[in-house]
Image (cartoon, rainbow, N blue to C red):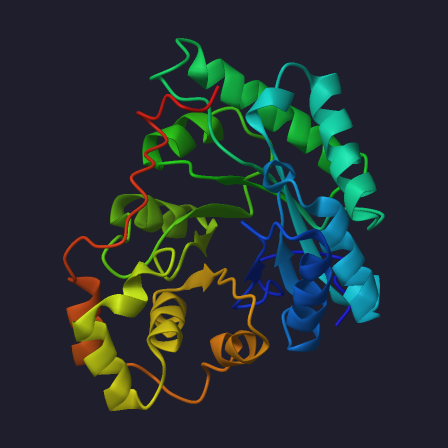
Amino acid sequence: MNYDKLNKENLPMIGYGTWKLKNKEETIEIVKNAILNGYTLIDTAQAYANLEYVGKGIKASKIERNKLIISGKLWNADKESKESIVNACKKTIEDLNCGYLDLYLIHWPASKAVHKDWIEINAKTWEALEYLYEIGLVKAIGVCNFKKNQLEELLKTAKIKPLVNQIEFHIGFRQLETVEYCKKEGILVEAWSPLGSGKMLKVEELKEMALKYNVSVAQLCIRFCIQNGVIPLPKSKDNERQKNNIDVFDFEISKEDMKILNEFPYVGGSGLDSETITIFN
């Protein structure tokens, strides 16, 4: 499929996350394998400090560029001006050696816990992303970690609606208010940490349910996202697990079990709240 136009109809149902891939040479092989195992959406970020090697992994796969969706993110330190945002985007493209980005996201919103003028900062940042779209450096734009009220403020001045909002989402942490608002506004939700950074794999109740469907806990968690209309971005370094994580279309979680999972008590959350967090500038 040629992704000349990126929209909600042709965004894959599963993507591959590259957060915490640190070993340089190993990253090349891991990313290459992920693509050869069927992942066409590769999620990256400047803050991950591994773009050069992710890019080399993409090249090593020898899959045509227009068959892949490469997603990058704007880090907080690069929000100073329109020029700095444009330069950050160009740097991401250069580091990945990918020619252009299919999707470019604001990694974290400016929060009221840190900035009195958070609404203006987010609006100006989004305006710069709209410019990147207009000049053709990126095919689509979106956000990460925006909660409902942050999106509401952004949409008051946005000329282009975000294609996606990438948030933490998994069993035991669904951020339902934000997800429902995104669906109402036609914004796709991507799930970072769909396995709760691996914490879900140790939950006994999930092990029992996965056994019922003859799948792994990881497959159960990924399928849970899909049945909630959310695009999971799992990451595994292991070749066989990569294959298993994308092999989730030959079973369906029952309505009764989805109810149990959707009402699952809090577990596995990172504790990062974009409205109150102060560790990011």
> Taking 79 as reference, is 101 left or right?
right
**Residue 178 placement (x, y as % from top left):** 33, 44
Which quarter shows the N terminus? bottom right
* Left or right position of 141 against 264: right
Number of marks in the rendered image: 0
Residue 138, horizontal then vertical, whole percent: 74, 43
Residue 37 image point, x, y percent: 64, 77
Residue at the (78%, 47%) spot, across then down: 96
List x then y, in percent, for residue 198.
36, 61
Q: Nearer the viewer, residue 238 or 191?
A: 238
Is 23 on the left or on the right of 123, as rendered?
right
- Please identify the quarter of the rendering in which residue 57 is found: bottom right
Residue drawn at point x = 67 percent, y = 15 percent: 81
Depth order, front residue of 161/30: 30
Q: Is residue 155 above or below residue 187?
A: above
Q: Is residue 246 above or below residue 54?
A: below
Can the viewer see residue 154 in this picture? yes
Q: Nearer the viewer, residue 89 or 37?
A: 37
- Can residue 134 be seen in the rendering of this structure? no
Q: Vertical placement of 57 versus 136: above or below?
A: below
For the point 56% across and 25% down, the residue is: 76
Asked if 251 appears above or below 169 in the picture, the reply is: below
Going 47% across and 45% down the picture, which residue do you hit? 165
Q: Left or right: where does residue 210 sit relative to residue 92?
A: left
